[in-house]
Image (tube, grey):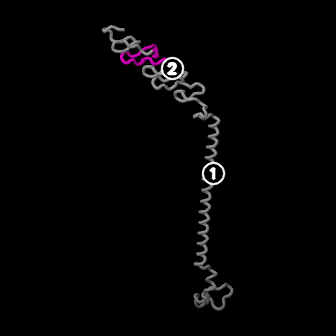
Amino acid sequence: MNSELDEGCDSNHYGSSCSLECNRNCENSTCNDTTGLCTLGCKTGFFGDKCDRQCTCCPSGCDRLTGRCNGDCPVGKFWVFCDKACNQGKQSPVPNTENRSRLYVVITVLCISLLLNIFTITRIFRNKACKRHDVNQEKKKDTDTISTPGIYDTAEENAGYQELGQLSGPSNYDHLQGPATNK
């Protein structure tokens, strides 16, 4: 203990009269002389502000404040505190590489199948649209031929049209030319 003239406690004690000892789980048993909080951190296996909580399942120690394990968990344990046991009738939350490979293959096959289905459906709709367009064009051609008669249809109805070589009598051209003049 320090006398009243000294400004604080030694590194292993704290409190108003320096009568309280720092937790032995503090690194070098060193703590803040007023609060008792460990200043250099905790010894391996302990956490909390005063290093008063033990992390029992962390072989590499744990975070001083949260208690989360540093490094890997021991075989058969998992989770952030390494406090959950593996293979107790439950599947591990982390899939192994063989399962991941199978998952990627299944996802790839599903994506390819989806693309093929989209392509096929698009092609079917295009073919139906083209057939509708062709039927509409055919109907339009049918109505065009009915409404606009061809040249041979008008020749029968109009007596003014005749085949060459079947002309009988004077032609209209002869009347237009006028009287013949001798030179």
Label disc, if present, on residue 116 of the rendered structure = 1
Residue drawn at (46%, 16%) of the image: 25
- In front of the other: 119 or 45: 45
- Give x and y (percent) for residue 78: 56, 29
Q: Is residue 49 above or below residue 10?
A: below
Question: Does residue 116 belong to the magenta stretch?
Answer: no
Magenta residues span: 24-45
Residue drawn at (45%, 24%) of the image: 65
Decide if residue 46 is in sight here: yes
- Magenta span: predominant SS is loop
- Give x and y (percent) for residue 9: 36, 11
**Quarter of the figure with residue 165:** bottom right
Instruction: Give the structural element (helix, strand or loop) at label 1.
Output: helix
In three-dimensional space, the C-alpha distance between marks 1 and 2, rounded to whole angstroms, equals 57 Å
**Quarter of the figure with residue 109:** top right
Question: Does residue 37 belong to the magenta stretch?
Answer: yes
Residue count near mark 2 (Cα–Cα under 10 Å), binned few <14, some 14–19, many ≥20 = many
Label disc, if present, on residue 128 of the rendered structure = none
Instruction: Give the structural element (helix, strand or loop) at label 2.
Output: loop
- Give x and y (percent) for residue 116: 63, 51
Q: Are marks 1 and 2 in contact (CB under 8 Å)?
A: no
Label disc, if present, on residue 45 of the rendered structure = 2
